[in-house]
Image (tube, rainbow, N blue to C red):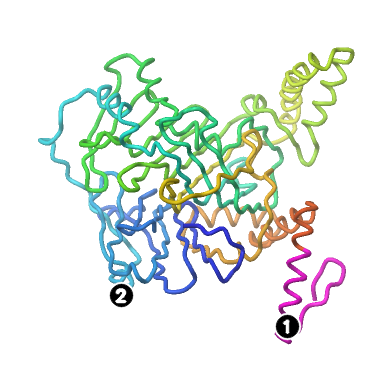
């Protein structure tokens, strides 16, 4: 479970882009890292679940099949399980893995017994699954804690990166309105921003993902069923986590449903404009909660990019200019009429300005990839928690005001086996003329704190506390010259 503390001595979190995250005290840990592969082809297996039975220690392999997980020493003799669709589970104790120095985890394709299949139509299977939401999913309030990352791209190169520790509150799966979820950003860090253009996103991408891509909570599966011609859904069968499952294709949705329990474990989508997603659920004490998602959204060629409305271009406040032009064109109107008119005109002006800007750029693709993996779930009846939120659903994540805690981020360890991670790092460091990604995170974090009066005051208190601690120990303490410590 993520403990929201700033002390470097209280917490150590290992993460591996959407590959995995494990949170634990710094002592008595078994660090397991490696690559999950198909035994026959030796190709990496993406998004496999890695967990220790009977615990909340869990991870997900990244796009290259790489993962890292930190297991408490007291769980050394429990089973570590790797599971994914279409393969038999891998099972060994962390102690055995450590002793044998296993780095390559080979999964065998599962053999499915067609004789056990129950003959039902795909539509019937999905309706049965949706009718059992209150039976199969948590209906009482719960909180999920986890790690989030969003990388923004231009012309197939990463130009900006945001990472965060979040708390996600859900009032329960019997409630499907948008006010039934809240998000609190606990920690946040950003790279330098090398984008030529910044897009307006009318809904915060992480909020949008945790609500709109949760097709069970929103009942979008039922909506699809009601608008799709009967008999058009297709189906295949497979195995997941030792259980037989149906894989149903329904009008752009791929839905993974358990044979015997009607639980929906995963929903994949593939849409227009390079949009694709995977939203996955995990069991906790027999009921499911959102565990992992990965979403990519690419918009190609200028004509399609422009309607997304550029809000900033190479440091120029395009949205501010559009607002000013819109405001000046509706003078004389009452305030009640002027506000909605300005809003609509701003959108129209932004589109036209964007088209002109794009004529002089070489941009033919903009987009982002975002991922989230849960590290813990807390059911409110089992353990009380305060519901906090600082996220604006209508702004991007990086606009959230969060104190940048250097102590906290310095205790993240980033294994380097993932090609995907190395690509992000290399492209951002190249754009920054060799400035490392860690340097970018720290520099942007300090600017964030210094530009906020509340955070600046906190920084001063922490500096004073550090000096006092060093004086009490009789140690040398740094002198401050300007904004620098020597």
Q: Residue 398, percent across and down?
A: 66, 45
Q: Secondary structure at mark 2?
A: helix
Residue drawn at the location 58% of the way across and 42% of the way down: 156
Q: Residue 118, percent across and down?
A: 15, 30
Q: Is residue 228 magenta?
A: no
Q: Is residue 468 magenta?
A: yes
Q: Residue 187, percent across and down?
A: 61, 54
Mark drawn on residue 265: none
331 and 464: which is toward the camera? 464
Mark drawn on residue 99: 2
Q: Nearer the viewer, mark 1 or mark 2?
A: 1
Mark drawn on residue 472: 1
* Number of other residues with Cα within 10 Å of mark 2, as a class: few under 14, some 14 to 19, many 20 or more: few
Horizontal relation, residue 88 to residue 414: left or right: left
484 and 111: which is toward the camera? 484
Q: Secondary structure at mark 1?
A: helix
Residue drawn at the location 64% of the way across and 33% of the way down: 394
The stretch of residues the image draws in magenta is 460-486
Image quadrant containing the C terminus: bottom right
């Amino acid at each position: 479970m993520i403990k929201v503390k700033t002390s470097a001595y209280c917490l150590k979190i290992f993460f591996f882009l959407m590959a995995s995250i494990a949170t634990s005290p710094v002592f008595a840990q078994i660090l397991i890292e490696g690559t999950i592969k198909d035994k026959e082809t030796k190709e990496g297996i993406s998004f496999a679940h890695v967990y220790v039975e009977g615990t909340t220690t869990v991870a997900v392999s990244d796009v290259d099949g790489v993962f890292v997980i930190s297991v408490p020493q007291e769980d050394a003799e429990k089973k570590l399980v790797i599971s994914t669709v279409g393969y038999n589970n891998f099972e060994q104790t962390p102690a055995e893995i450590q002793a044998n120095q296993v780095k390559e985890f080979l999964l065998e394709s599962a053999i499915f017994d067609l004789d056990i299949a129950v003959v039902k139509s795909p539509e019937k299977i999905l309706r049965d699954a949706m009718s059992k939401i209150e039976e199969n999913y948590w209906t009482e309030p719960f909180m999920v804690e986890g790690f989030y990352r969003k990388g923004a791209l231009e012309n197939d190169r990463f130009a900006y990166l945001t990472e965060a520790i979040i708390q996600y509150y859900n009032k329960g799966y019997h409630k499907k309105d948008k006010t039934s979820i809240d998000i609190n950003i606990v920690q946040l860090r950003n790279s330098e921003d090398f984008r030529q253009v910044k897009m307006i996103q009318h809904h915060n991408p992480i909020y949008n993902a945790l609500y709109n891509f949760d097709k069970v909570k929103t009942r979008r599966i039922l909506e699809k069923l009601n608008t799709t011609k009967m008999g058009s859904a297709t189906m295949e069968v497979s195995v997941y986590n030792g259980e037989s499952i149906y894989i149903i294709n329904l009008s752009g949705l791929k839905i993974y449903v358990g044979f015997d329990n009607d639980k929906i474990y995963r929903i994949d989508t593939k849409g227009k404009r390079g949009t694709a997603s995977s939203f996955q659920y995990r069991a906790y004490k027999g009921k499911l909660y959102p565990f992992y998602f990965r979403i990519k959204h690419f918009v190609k060629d200028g004509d399609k990019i422009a309607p997304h409305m550029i809000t900033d271009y190479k440091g120029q406040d395009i949205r501010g200019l559009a607002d000013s032009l819109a405001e000046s064109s509706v003078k004389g109107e009452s305030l009640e009429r002027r506000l909605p008119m300005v809003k609509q005109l701003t959108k129209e002006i932004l589109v036209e300005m964007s088209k002109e800007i794009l004529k002089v750029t070489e941009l033919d693709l903009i987009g982002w990839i975002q991922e989230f993996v849960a590290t813990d779930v807390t059911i409110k009846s089992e353990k009380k928690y305060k519901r906090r939120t600082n996220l604006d659903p209508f702004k991007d994540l990086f606009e959230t005001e969060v104190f940048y805690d250097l102590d906290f981020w310095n205790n993240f360890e980033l294994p380097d086996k993932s090609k995907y991670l190395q690509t992000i790092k290399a492209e951002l460091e190249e754009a920054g003329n060799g400035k490392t990604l860690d340097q970018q995170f720290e520099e942007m974090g300090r600017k964030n704190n210094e530009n906020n009066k509340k955070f600046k005051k906190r920084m001063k208190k922490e500096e004073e506390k550090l000096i006092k601690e060093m004086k009490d120990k009789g140690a040398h303490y740094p002198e401050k010259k300007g904004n620098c410590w020597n």
